[in-house]
Image (cartoon, rainbow, N blue to C red):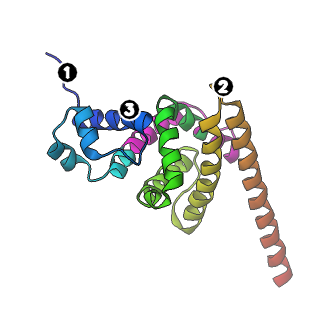
Amino acid sequence: MAKRTDPSDKIIAATLKLAAKRGWHELTLADIATEAKVALPVLGELFATKAAILAAWSRRVDAEVLKLAQAEDLSGESARDRLFDVLMMRFDALTPDKAALAAIARDLKRDPVALIPLAEPALQSLGWMLEAANIDSSGFRGALRVRGLALIWARVLLVWLEDGEDMAKTMAELDRRLRQAEDLLNAVARFRAGSSRDAA
């Protein structure tokens, strides 16, 4: 008996395929349904918007990276090195869909409003990346970490989209950004420690 493909799988695959060819702005849910060979009402029951399809795809990438990170022994590394490794795993996981992401990124630059429904899923994904690196993403401090990482990720993603297969520029940019963030956090910690001593 032939294995039946999950409609969600077909919809996500069709979305990425069409995004790579046509871009994001002109792509419609009807186009996606036709490409995926699913009825439009079926697509509507599963995904209300194109952003919801991307969010579902992102969650699958999250799951893949979490499995990879769990299989690796990162316990002997510093927090910065663990996070570097996890984020590079994410870039590896994104590579098969790089053309689609490049097209989507180009269109979103011209339509910032379209970024709004994508922001929360992106932050959730980065929270999972912190957790995969054994860095707490909960509470107020965790929220700050997630948003700080979002700034780093956005910068490095642009480099990755233009980078070659070896991802040398991506690794260099990610390392530089993480070191800058680490230096800033260390400076803040020293300032707080000094302020505490002065107050005492």
Which residue is tagged 2?
166
Marks 1 and 3, Cα distance to the nearest angstrom?
A: 22 Å
Between residue 86 and residue 21, name the one nearer to us: 21
Asked if residue 100 shows in the view, the reply is yes
Circle 3 sits in a helix, a strand or a loop, which is it? helix
Horizontal relation, residue 32 to residue 187: left or right: left
Q: Is residue 156 magenta?
A: no
Please tell me how crowded label 1 is: few (under 14), some (14-19), or many (20+) other residues with Cα within 10 Å. few
Magenta region's main secondary structure?
A: helix
Cα–Cα gap, marks 2 and 1: 36 Å
Residue 1 position within the rendered picture, expressed as x and y whole percent measured from the top left: 13, 15
* Residue position for label 1: 3
In this picture, is 5 found above or below 46?
A: above
Q: Is residue 180 above or below residue 169?
A: below
Q: Earlier in the sequence, mark 2 or mark 1?
A: 1
The kind of residue on which mark 1 rests is Lys
> Is residue 194 left or right of 6 when viewed as pictured?
right
Segment tinted magenta in the rendering = 57-86
Q: Name the residue at 29% across, 34% down.
A: 9
Which x, y percent locates residue 66? Answer: 48, 39
